[in-house]
Image (spheres, rainbow, N blue to C red):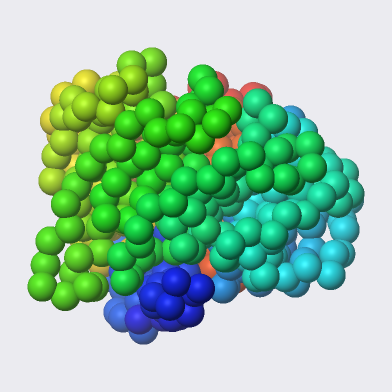
Amino acid sequence: MRALLLRVPTTKWLFQILGAWVLASCADSLPVAPLAPLKPSMEAEVVWKEGIGSVEQAILRPVVVQGVLYTANEAGDLRAFEPASGKELWRVKTTESFSAGLGSGEQMLLLGDKKGEVLAYTLKGELLWRSQLSSELMVAPQAAEGVVVTRTADGRITGLSATDGKRRWSVQRPMPALVLRGISQIAMERGAVLVGLPGGKLLALNLADGSVGWEATVSIPKGATELERINDVVGTPLFGFRDVCTASYQGKVACLDVVKGETLWSTDLSVTGALGAEGNKLFATTEKGDVVALNRTSGTVAWKQESLEGRYPSAPQAFGDYVVLGDAQGVVHFLSRADGTELGRIKTDDVAMIQQAQVLDDNLILLTNRDGKLFALAPHGAQSHWLPSWFR
């Protein structure tokens, strides 16, 4: 298993997972299951590709802000691209060692460095301010309504002024001995902050002052060893009108009342990355490599696709008529959003694990692999009537 141990100020050891899931970090050394033959009913093409530099030991994910794609790497390069073409708009080479990001909000790009600082940049790459935190960032900072919210390795959630980075409030929760690094993200909406925590907890805070609205248990750690008891909430909590849905590793998928934090439903399912969502469905990848669609209102299984077991698939992303995800050998799979049938697949030009898929716009999806390569893909075929004519 490719994993690093990180010493933090609390003197506890953090089990640092590079990527969005645990078993995926083993994929370089474990055998990958072969793919079954497929007669595709759709095709996809790589529209553009770009190397952004090493992200192997950091939590650095591209972000789209106001129609521009931004990337960062460990060496301190901050770049902006035109999403449709991959054309570089600008590049700033800083002297920083970025380790967490990219976050956004309030007309800023937000990053963390290896010294435990938050750095705020303009959308043109100019440094606005930097703020020292109590320890290294565990997730990308996020900003809204004049507040930048961070979560650090010592279990502290901090609200900073978006104007100058000065601390406005702070909340701390105890941390277990082993946690997964970088697999949960901060969600902010309607004046609330939702933060997934180790131990299967989800915390709702008031964005303005950090007061606790509620704290819910998504799942309870089980097992005899610390490794077996890893039970972190993963991905970005998904806001709905009345609910918020989330999942935990070695635990459950659950939807809770967004106001009270009471569990509306939960189902046993050990997911390995963020949930995807579209309409009344939630999409999840399990430890075994199954892709599962759940009804958002009840938690019942709508469909299950087992063809990717043993290929360490990434978290699923809803994209038009499809659910898209990559695997440990750089193959991108397109499943039917309606019933989970595999409709097509495309191999990227590098045999490297796909870590993340995200929608760039209605026509393009961005894939990121462990080698720090970006691939913008566009599907075309019978189910892609919503694509413009030049992709058909």
In the rendering, at what x and y percent does residue 336 appear? 33, 35
Image point (51%, 20%), residue name:
190
Q: Quadrant of residue 301?
A: top left
Image point (20%, 65%), residue name:
229
In the rendering, at what x and y percent does residue 384 appear? 49, 28
Outermost residue toward the bottom?
29
Please determine whether, in this image, residue 65 is positioned above or below residue 70: above
Image point (53%, 23%), residue name:
191
Left or right: 120 as drawn, with respect to 334? right
Q: Quadrant of residue 26?
A: bottom left
- Residue sitting nearer the eye, 271 or 312: 271
Locate the N terminus by quadrant: bottom left
- Residue sitting nearer the eye, 226 or 69: 226
- Residue sitting nearer the eye, 10 or 28: 10
In the rendering, at what x and y percent does residue 258 appear? 34, 23
Outermost residue toward the top?
241
